[in-house]
């Protein structure tokens, strides 16, 4: 434990403390009987999520999109050559309720970014298609989105990014259904 005469050091041994180091240091003083290694991981992931979300929302605001609407446009864009999916296919890709998806599709349709039509193979089915304007918007938004992700990840080398991605994948696979 650091005393008042020494410079605080990060939990990773560096001379730099982040907010999670400060929280863990206080917890270790208050409850030295507990282990906080998981807090160092999960706390940092949660903190990163805050900053990543803030940046993504800033970027999407220029297109008057929220994250959910972008997700729908991006899911359609990933399905060439017709850029269309059924609502059930979209729902599986964006992992939301059918009601929430309907609201997103309604908003995007009212802006002319997607269209809905009866499916050729099923009179009861609907198909959602990216319009030309929706294609233009998502193409531009994806370019900005990837640039923002690259900027956010630039604190890590390419090798560190691959390693970190692998570790995060390992954690996700352990908790995903």
Image (cartoon, rainbow, N blue to C red):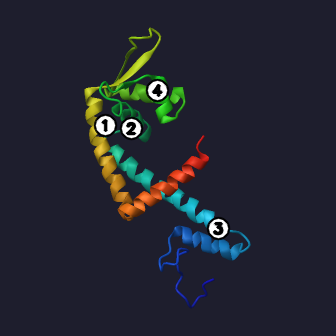
Residue that protrudes farthest toward the bottom in the picture: 5
Labels 3 and 1: the sequence-earlier one: 3
In front: label 2 or label 3: 3
Q: Secondary structure at mark 2?
A: helix
Residue identified by numbered label 2: 70
Q: CA distance from mark 2 to mark 3?
A: 36 Å
Q: With respect to residue 160, does 84 lie above or below?
A: above
Residue 165, percent from left and from top: 46, 55
In front: label 1 or label 4: 4
Labels 2 and 4: the sequence-earlier one: 2
Residue 176, percent from left and from top: 58, 43
Q: CA distance from mark 1 to mark 2?
A: 7 Å
Does 159 sit left or right of 5 as displayed?
left
Q: CA distance from mark 2 to mark 4?
A: 16 Å
Residue 172, percent from left and from top: 55, 49
Residue identified by numbered label 3: 36
Q: Residues within 10 Å of mark 4 (few under 14, many from 20)?
A: some
Between 125 and 81, the one lying in front of the other is 81
Labels 1 and 2: the sequence-earlier one: 2
Residue identified by numbered label 4: 89
- Say if mark 2 contacts mark 3, CB within 8 Å: no
Q: Is residue 85 visible?
A: yes
Residue identified by numbered label 1: 138
Residue at 42% over, 25% down: 106
Q: CA distance from mark 3 to mark 4?
A: 41 Å
Q: With respect to residue 67, does 166 lie above or below?
A: below
- Say if mark 2 contacts mark 4, CB within 8 Å: no
Residue that protrudes farthest toward the right in the picture: 33
- Say if mark 1 contacts mark 2, CB within 8 Å: yes
Residue 93, percent from left and from top: 47, 33
């Amino acid at each position: 434990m650091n005393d008042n005469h020494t410079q605080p050091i990060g939990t990773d041994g560096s001379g730099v403390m982040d907010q999670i180091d400060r929280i863990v240091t206080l917890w270790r003083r208050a409850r030295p009987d507990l282990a906080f290694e998981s807090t160092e991981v999960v706390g940092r992931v949660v903190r990163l999520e805050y900053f990543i979300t803030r940046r993504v929302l800033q970027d999407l605001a220029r297109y008057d999109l929220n994250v959910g609407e972008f997700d729908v446009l991006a899911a359609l864009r990933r399905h060439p050559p017709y850029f269309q999916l059924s609502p059930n296919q979209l729902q599986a890709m964006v992992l939301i309720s059918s009601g929430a998806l309907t609201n997103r599709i309604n908003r995007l349709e009212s802006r002319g970014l997607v269209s809905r039509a009866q499916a050729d193979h099923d009179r009861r089915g609907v198909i959602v298609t990216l319009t030309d304007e929706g294609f233009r918007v998502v193409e531009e938004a994806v370019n900005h989105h990837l640039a923002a992700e690259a900027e956010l990840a630039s604190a890590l080398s390419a090798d560190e990014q691959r390693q970190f991605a692998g570790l995060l994948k390992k954690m996700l696979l352990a908790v995903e259904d």
